[in-house]
Image (cartoon, grey):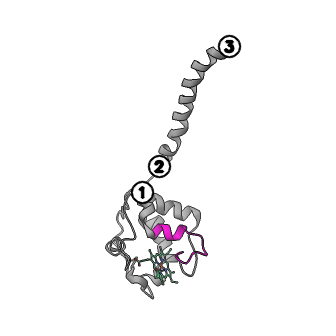
Amino acid sequence: MRSTRLIPMAFPLLLFILVVAGSGPAASSSAEAVDFASEIWPVLERSCLDCHGGKDTFSNLVVTSPEALLKGGDLGKVIVPGKPDESPLLTRTELPMDDLDYMPVEGEGLSEEETAALRQWIADGADFGDWTGTE
Ligand code: HEC
């Protein structure tokens, strides 16, 4: 009767595997914090500034200071600290490029690494660190 002895063994083993597998994502989300000034700002400057506080300001969304970014645009907040999926600053860059809401409207879009960094930065609380904005 091997099988009846295996069942009670298999259960803790399965639990163990689940716990080990489950600790994976938790471990990676505590990876090093994303630094706004060196990792996020260069992306916004390259892909968003022209139309949001640079040459033009569409939808009253300005990306050149923490206050303006947290204030958001005509449609409301674009960053909800801790909630990347409710933050249009991120979600609009993650849409398929042919979606009407995709950002940027023109120019270089965000790479997967860049959206991942932006996602983590918002999830971690959208801390601007030393960055006080730019002129
Ligand atoms: C070529 C111009 C252009 C660029 C570049 C651009 N946008 Fe926009 N953006 C617009 C226009 C036009 C609107 C208003 C229409 C709309 O909401 O789609 C807008 C609106 C938005 C809104 C909605 C704001 C609100 O509250 O009404 C968000 C969020 C946004 N853009 C994010 C971004 C981000 C993030 C980037 C850079 C990755 C970016 N945009 C780059 C033109 C641009």
Q: What amino acid is labelled 1 in the image?
A: Ala
Q: Residues within 10 Å of mark 1 (few under 14, many from 20)?
A: some
Kindly indicate whether the residue at mark 1 contacts the one at mark 2 (C-beta within 8 angstroms): yes
Question: Does the numbered disc 1 mark a residue whose Cβ is under 8 Å from ligand 1?
Answer: no
Q: CA distance from mark 1 to mark 3?
A: 49 Å
Q: Which label is found at residue 29?
A: 2
- In this rendering, the answer to whether 44 lies above or below 55 is above
Which residue in the protein does label 3 denote?
2
Which residue in the protein does label 1 denote?
123
Residue 3 in sight here: yes
Q: CA distance from mark 3 to mark 2?
A: 42 Å
Residue sitting at 58 percent across and 67 percent down?
111
The numbered mark, 3 or 2, whose residue comes first in the sequence reads: 3
Task: Report the span colored magenta.
Answer: 89-103
Question: How many marks are shown on the rendered structure?
Answer: 3
Residue 53 in sight here: no
User: Which picture quadrant has residue 67?
Assistant: bottom left
- In this rendering, the answer to whether 97 lies above or below 126 is below
The numbered mark, 2 or 1, whose residue comes first in the sequence reads: 2
What x and y, as percent, mark residue 19?
A: 51, 34
- Label 1 residue SS: helix
